[in-house]
Amino acid sequence: MRNGGFMFVFRPGPFEHAPQTWIGILQAPADPTARGRFQRDLVTRFPNVSAIDVKEILTTIRQAVANVTLAITIVGAVALLSGVLILVGAVAMTKFQRVYEAAILRTLGASTRTIGTMLAVEYGGLGLLAGAIGGAGALVLSWAVCRHVFDIPWRPAPGIAALGAIATTALVGVVGVAASYDVLRRKPLSTLRAE
């Protein structure tokens, strides 16, 4: 339609003897050279036959999809690395306050294990919140793209969103506790004397 052409499809009947176009699919040789030779021989023998190599089209589409997948993977990896660096920076900014709080808690009898568990729960909770918001956002965005861009039925994947939330919880918990290692290692006496 964009080029100004149009097409009608009729059932057999009054147009049986009118000029017709037949479309058929056949499997050509797998080797590209043999396939090209086959197409050339087919068109030479039957000039009114158009041979379209669908295998080349599918290969091009697969390459395009693979390139898009690679680009999305790279962008996701950069976003993940940026998030980890931002988390480490946020932990570093509050390190002195956390060292002081840990010194007071140790003075009151808390063990290193208890303080480590508290940090793990805190960062795990932050990771769970971030993962839940990210998963919900991904579901909403996929719904919007399916319904309004591609006009295809939407099938939610809550399992993948939940898996992403769990992975985010674990990653943020591990990175937060690892970045807070200095808080767990420092002796309370030197910290309280410095204050």
Image (cartoon, grey):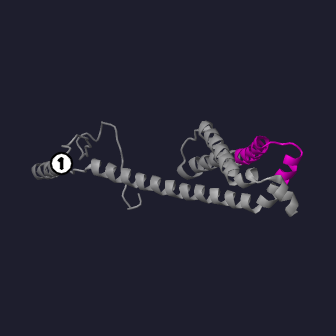
Relative to 29, is 177 on the left or the right?
A: right
Residue 77 at x, y percent in the picture: 54, 55
The answer to which of 189 and 137 lies nearer the viewer is 189
Residue sitting at x 58%, y 38%: 155
Q: Quadrant of the N terminus?
A: bottom left
Instruction: Please name whichever residue, 192 or 29, is drawn nearer the observer in this view of the structure.
Output: 192
Most frequent secondary structure within the magenta stretch: helix
Q: Which residues are magenta?
A: 100-129
User: For residue 161, what is the image quadrant?
Assistant: top right
In the rendered image, residue 38, in percent from the top left (x then y), is placed at: 14, 48
Percent position (x, y) of residue 140?
A: 65, 47
Q: Which residue is mark 1?
A: 35
Q: Residue at x 64, y 39 (%)?
A: 162
Residue shown at 76% from the left, 47% from the top: 119
The answer to whether 122 appears left or right of 108 in the picture is left
Residue 84 visible in the snapshot: yes
Residue type highlighted by circle 1: Arg
